[in-house]
Image (cartoon, rainbow, N blue to C red):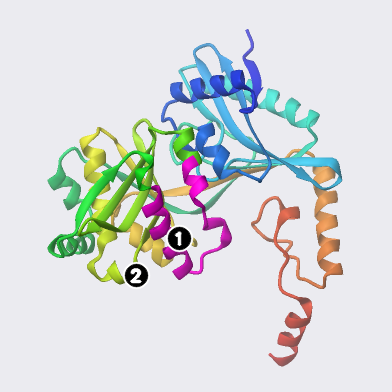
């Protein structure tokens, strides 16, 4: 008996209920695969859907954003964060994969989908992907020890020193699981993004956080270091079944000398240990080996895992046509176009430097 494939639209009440049920039954309950998280994160990017299959005692849940491309074509991309085709159950994986990908490809053909790009889970809960797998950058994952002494001992000496420095500065820590922390978090987080001159994508308004609480009210945790009852450093966590994900965070500049965020992250691990979690995903840096990655490594010195993406051209002829159009667009605008870029799909790659500047630089070198 073949598996039952279905495409779920969260705008449909029955589909939304099915999506939530499949997520609840999934191995790790990856927060980014929940429609209550994927929806707000994908707002304005396209149409949020989930391609699913159920066979024997197993299921596949593959959240995607269906995007318009030029010429009436489309492509699909997984929502921000970690994802891919999440598999649960004990059915033979190879047989399930063959059935799922056949169903997916038929659906993609009907939808005129040219390419597929997925950001993959760091764990072994992803169906084998037939596309190209590309290692992007190291991510840090901390295994949570059951007792606090071991928890502190497994962090770097610098982290331990910084966290104790924060305690000597009389900072306290508060854990908040409801929406009462939104305003304080938004203030600290926004101030941090402005100070770092972060890209607009990293800026979120209060309604975004309210939408998260509406979508997954029991899967958010704020951990705040406070001075005299006022939050000065806050991390926002997304909670799965046995894994917690650092999502967003910020620290007031004036408070940074007391190293409050080291205390926040050590307190996160203590809370996770007390509540039976196994893994703490800190993520990586903006680029491999940068300062942010090195900072996170202090909390998980032995926890490096490679973050991978999967990419696939589903219609080579139409894909090449879109790339040619993008190349022509770059030429018309007198901008560089990097044919060897790792950006996928290539027809969505940002245009490079103005050719006039590059030619002038070449003439003077």
- Within 10 Å of the Cα at label 2, are there few (<14), some (14-19), or many (20+) other Cα atoms? few
Residue 298 screen position, x and y as percent: 29, 58
State the residue position of label 1. Answer: 190
Q: Which mark is residue 253?
A: 2
Q: Residue at x 78, y 32 (%)?
A: 111
Local secondary structure at mark 1: helix
* Above-or-below relation of 125 to 245: above
Left or right: 65, with 201 as reference point: right
Residue 196 lies within the magenta run: yes
Q: Going by the picture, which residue comes out furthest to the bottom?
A: 364
Q: Which mark is residue 295?
A: none
Find the magenta span and give its range. Answer: 182-210
Residue 223 lies within the magenta run: no
Q: CA distance from mark 2 to mark 1?
A: 12 Å
* Above-or-below relation of 200 to 195: above
The quarter of the image holding the C terminus is bottom right
In which quadrant of the rendered view does residue 218 lie? top left
Residue 343 screen position, x and y as percent: 65, 56
Return the residue nearer the eye: 102 or 357: 357
Which mark is first along the chain, 1 or 2? Answer: 1
* Above-or-below relation of 15 to 257: above
* Above-or-below relation of 177 to 181: above
Q: Going by the picture, which residue comes out furthest to the top?
A: 1
């Amino acid at each position: 008996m073949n598996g039952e494939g279905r495409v779920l639209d969260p705008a449909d009440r029955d589909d939304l209920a099915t999506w939530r049920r499949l997520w609840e039954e999934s191995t790790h309950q990856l927060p980014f695969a929940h429609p209550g998280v994927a929806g707000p994160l994908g707002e304005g990017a396209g149409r949020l859907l989930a391609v699913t299959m159920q066979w024997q005692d197993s299921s596949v849940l593959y959240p995607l954003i269906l995007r318009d491309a030029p010429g009436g074509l489309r492509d699909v991309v997984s929502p921000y964060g970690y994802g891919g085709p999440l598999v649960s159950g004990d059915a033979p994986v190879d047989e399930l994969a063959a059935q799922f990908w056949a169903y997916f490809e038929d659906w993609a053909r009907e939808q005129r989908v040219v390419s597929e790009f997925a950001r993959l889970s760091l764990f072994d809960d992803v169906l084998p992907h037939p596309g190209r797998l590309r290692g992007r950058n190291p991510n840090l994952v901390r295994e949570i020890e059951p007792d606090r002494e071991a928890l502190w001992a497994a962090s770097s000496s610098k982290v331990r020193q910084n966290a104790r420095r924060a305690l000597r500065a009389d900072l306290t820590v508060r854990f908040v699981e409801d929406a009462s922390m939104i305003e304080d978090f938004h203030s600290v987080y926004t101030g941090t993004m402005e100070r770092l001159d972060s890209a607009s994508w990293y800026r979120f308004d209060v309604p975004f956080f309210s939408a998260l609480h509406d979508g997954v009210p029991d899967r958010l945790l704020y951990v705040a270091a406070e001075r005299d009852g006022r939050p000065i450093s806050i991390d926002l966590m997304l909670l799965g079944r046995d894994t917690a994900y650092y999502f967003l965070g910020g620290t007031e500049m004036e408070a940074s000398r007391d190293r409050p965020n080291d205390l926040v992250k050590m307190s996160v691990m203590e809370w996770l240990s007390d509540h039976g979690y196994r893994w703490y995903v800190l993520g990586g840096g903006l680029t491999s080996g940068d300062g942010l990655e090195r900072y996170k490594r202090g909390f998980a010195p032995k926890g490096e895992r490679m973050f991978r993406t999967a990419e696939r051209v589903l219609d080579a002829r139409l894909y090449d046509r879109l790339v040619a159009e993008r190349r022509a667009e770059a030429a018309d605008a007198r901008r560089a176009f990097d044919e060897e870029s790792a950006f996928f799909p290539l027809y969505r790659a940002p245009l490079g430097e103005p050719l006039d500047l590059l030619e002038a630089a070449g003439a003077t070198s």
